[in-house]
Amino acid sequence: MGLFQSVNMTQGNPVTQVVRFTMPLLVGNIAQQLYNTVDSIIVGRYVGDNALAAVGSAGPLLNIMIVLFIGIGAGAGIVVSQYYGAKRREDLSRAVCSSIILTILASLALMVSGPLLARPMLKLLNTPDSILNWCQSYLSILFLGALGGGIYNILSGVLRGLGDSISALIYLLVAVGSNIVLDFLFVAYLGMGVSGVAWATVLAQLISAVLCLVHICRLRDTLDIRLEYFRINRKDIMPLITLGLPSGVTQAITSMSAILIQSLMNSYGEQFIAASTIVSRIDGFVILPALSFGTAMTTFSGQNIGARKLNRVIYGTRQATMTAMGVSALLMALILLFGRPLMGIFTQTEELIDLSYSLIRILAVGYIVMTITQCLSGIMRGAGDTLTPMWISVLTSVGLYLPLTYGLVFLTRTTGQESGNYYMIYVSLLICWIIGALITFVFYERGSWKSKALASVSM
């Protein structure tokens, strides 16, 4: 099999195919995570801890604004994998073109509304005045450059749906290299500060988008990119929206929850915000195996459901989930052993390193249980059951996490800590991860997703 060929996951050993597909996807996700991480390292080292806090504080608002891309990408990945598995070339071609049109429309909406809403939303979150202008500048620039990031994320999802996790990886690595070079140029040499890292990210994402678009247009053996397919057609658009909407809604609700948590974090001051930013950057890498295996399982499930091989899905799920848990356990051990040196990459302030390390130790065991959630949710999504993972995520991230966090913080208020113990924010998150994994396992075992699978192949 050639390097850039799609992977047919309906044949061969299921675990081997899933792992084979996951590895380049994992490297790609690591590269994707480097965008924000390099930004944080550069501003933390060359501008200061407050600039690091500014970049981190802007994150939840950025996430809530890109939910349209999340929904379109999720819908496109599922539809593409099922059409590809069922060998429905024309439907596959129309789905890809429709997803591009939807992405362009979503990007234009974000480019107009994002910069206008950035400052008012930051003020609502009680963002400290010392970092407010930096946060606004960083967000506004990223919103203005939304088209490149949107196109890349959607088309990389399309490629994964086709079983090709290599091509998007190659293009992303080029973009990440460009981002690192531009970060140093704009910040270290030109002194552009937080705005510099934002412009570097926008330009790098644009590079990856162009490369993906060119590649998609060259897949003439698999699909057809025709002008007549680039239109808003209900028949082509509705499967993308129907299957993608739950993921988009999940991301929107989860992001709203994160915004409320960020508001609570902001009340503890710049140092805690900076520590939480460091933790989120390290955390972003540690959860990547879970997310990567989850995405691979969606493609595996979608292709095999399209080929009507349900038994193969069930067998592959057990084996691949155990493999993914082993990888996450290894990373958890590495974090516990080498956490402090990792924190030191972002800052030279000892108090900040100590605080960051103590926070991530709370979450350590949660990375294993999160792997269960991601893998089983991926199977259900690939089968067409996107609602069950959605409501489980909403239940744990909003219905449980928010009241539990605010409740524990309230109960730990003392004379010396009028705002409560900030460690409870992370204790609550760990509890929610564990409960989410248990609920997901129960609903996977109940098997209602199997009936969705039978219905999806006849659409």
Image: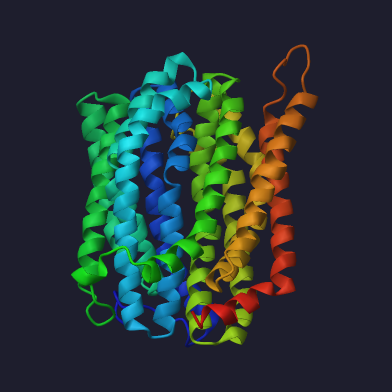
Q: How is the image coloured?
A: rainbow
Name the residue: 67% across, 34% down. 425
Residue 256: horizontal and vertical position, in percent? 56, 39
Q: Nearer the viewer, residue 420 or 456?
A: 456
Name the residue: 68% across, 37% down. 402
Q: Nearer the viewer, residue 142 or 426?
A: 142
Left or right placement of residue 161 versus residue 208 in this view: right
In the rendered image, the vertical position of residue 175 relative to residue 354, given as above or below = below
Residue 299 visible here: yes
Q: Outermost residue, front direction?
A: 234
In the rendered image, the vertical position of residue 450 relative to residue 408, given as above or below = below
Name the residue: 44% across, 15% down. 130
In the rendered image, the vertical position of residue 168 relative to residue 418, given as above or below = below
The N terminus: image quadrant: bottom left
Q: Outermost residue, top direction?
A: 415
Name the residue: 69% across, 41% down. 401
Left or right placement of residue 189 versus residue 366 in this view: left
Residue 41: horizontal and vertical position, in percent? 39, 34
Left or right placement of residue 246 versus residue 422 in this view: left
Residue 365 visible here: no
Residue 359: horizontal and vertical position, in percent? 63, 35
* Rendering quarter of residue 269: top right
* Rendering quarter of residue 166: bottom left
In the rendered image, the vertical position of residue 242 relative to residue 273, given as above or below = below
Residue 159: horizontal and vertical position, in percent? 35, 68
Q: Nearer the viewer, residue 230 or 213?
A: 230
- Count of numbered tags: 0
